Image (tube, rainbow, N blue to C red):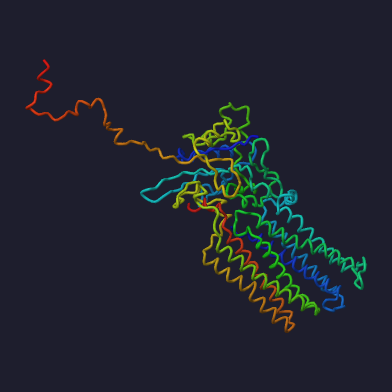
Amino acid sequence: MTQLALVIDLNVCVGCSACVTSCKEWNTSSEGGGGMVDKNPYGKDPTGTFFNRVQTFEVGEYPNVETVHFPKSCLHCEDPPCVPVCPTGASYKRKEDGIVLVDYDKCIGCKYCSWACPYGAREIDEKQKVMKKCTLCVDRIYDTTLPEARRKPACVLACPTSARLFGDVHDPMSEVSVAINERGGYQLMPEWGTRPSNHYLPRRKMKAQVTEESLNRIDNPLKKEEQRAPVSSDLPSLDDFLF
Amino acid sequence: MHPAFSVIFLTTLIGAGQGLFLALYTGQVYNTFGVVGDAMPQQALYIAGTVIVTVLMALGLFASFFHLGRPERAWRAATMWRTSWLAREVIVLPAFAGTAFIWGALHYLGIDPVIFTTGTVEVKLTLLVGLVAGVLAFLLYVCTGMIYAAVKFIQEWATPLTIVNYTLLGLASGFSLAAALSAHYCSTLVDAYALWALVFTLVGFVSRMFALRRNGRLKRKSTACTAIGVRHPKITQISQGAMGGSFNTREFFHHKSPQFLQTVKVFFLIAVFIVPVTLVVIGWSNQFAVVLLAAALIQYVGLLAERWFFFAQANHPQNLYYQAT
């Protein structure tokens, strides 16, 4: 069974929001779906639909503080709580690749699925009046007219630091599974049992372990000769015998 | 959560409608089995009551459409009844309203043959139709309550008390209305209705207070730590990815001050429980239909505030991601 998902590396995300804009660009201009509406984009209270947002958190207190940029989109849960609550069946999880999608032609815009998502991953489209969410760019990852390397979600392709990996988390040999395994990939809010497919790779402290000993070796052979015994001028030295 | 008036009106109106029907049917059961010793037929009361039940249900249904983005597709909402409590409500609501209407129509048309006789009691057609409608009314309370109680992330709602409160407060408002109506028709059922209205209001008060106490002591399962997966006691959000607000900031928060919430809480405790109980006792002991009607109306207004507070108090875990612009 395939479960496509994103793995987001918080260690290298710089919070540039390139994933946000590329997501918006692709999903607004691609065929079908009706785009992602923007209301008052240049007015007083701009608002609009986004599938993906980069949030910023500050961890700790000055001076021991760290800034964490945190991209958040639909996590394509393996046990998605938003799906069974949908009264029309518009919200569904695809059997073949595990992507959670909304059928925009069936959705009645009751917002119940957004209540049932603890992550706030779903947003109503104010123009179409239906619920929208990340599709993992389902309209491009299977597009055979694209070169194979480009068959990835727009956000993954846009990320300048390669903080976003895309692949099958059920395949133990995939790039994403290896990254989760080797680098402690974790899920958000595990307490609700939703089993999100998207994983996050934690921040890593990149500290070089440099000790005094490694800078100044006690038994450095190059410095052997410098450690001479104190010389007494009364006794003959080695120089007296040589030459 | 953002308290949407469409849902507030829906739940309070249909709750009162179900309660009123159950009151009417209780009256019929009492009459049939001679509990209140009233042999006088209650046709006028039943028919007027059914008209009010139908109007309440229709108004509730009408209000619910304002909650939908695409009301023209509302018929689709019945399809996923296997998994969704919302779909179940969408089925049970018209089923109840329809059966209740048939019950009233049978009384109006006088089609009421005796189906069978047990002892000296004649079980008539309307008694059986009313039984079906009564069961549906209780099912509808469960469906409405479960829509909220089934969302396990919203810890304020995820408790059996939610269903109990929806049922008890619906019954209280329905029986208060029935008491006023029966007093208007000078029916002997007014004693039973007023008594049940008091019982449901007082028991509802106890269970609502239990819910308030429980919600006041909730221990949050989700924290900023589990939300972003960083273990640190101090995590401050400094940006949420949008400066002008979004669906996430509008749908999941009431945007009112804690003082306002506190005021609404005190108001609904007075208007749903204290004032109606007082007025029902006064109206009942003096047989003032107007006072009983005032009790029912004030209780309904109080229930609007109660439902507003029910939504506003619920804190959705997604708010952890929207703490600062």
Name the quadrant of the N terminus of chain A: top right
Q: Quadrant of residue B60?
A: bottom right
* Residue in the image at 71% along x and 67% along y: B170
User: Which of the two residues, A22 or B92, is positioned nearer the viewer here?
Assistant: B92
In this picture, residue B177 sits left or right of residue A20: right
- Residue furthest front in the image: A235
- Which residue is farthest left? A234
Q: Is residue A112 left or right of residue A73?
A: right
Residue under the point 61% across and 39% down: A135
Residue A143, horizontal then vertical, whole percent = 63, 30
Quarter of the image holding residue B91? bottom right
**Residue A104 percent location from the top left of the image:** 67, 44
- Image height of B54 relative to A86, above or below: below
Percent from the top left, x then y, of residue A141?
Answer: 61, 32
Image height check: is A27 above or below A116?
A: above
Choose top left, top right, bottom left or bottom right for residue B40.
bottom right
Q: Nearer the viewer, residue B181 or B174?
A: B174
> Relative to B243, is B29 on the left or the right?
right
Residue B207 versus residue A154 in the image, above or below:
below
Q: Nearer the viewer, residue B222 or B79?
A: B222
- State which quarter of the image contains the C terminus of chain A: top left
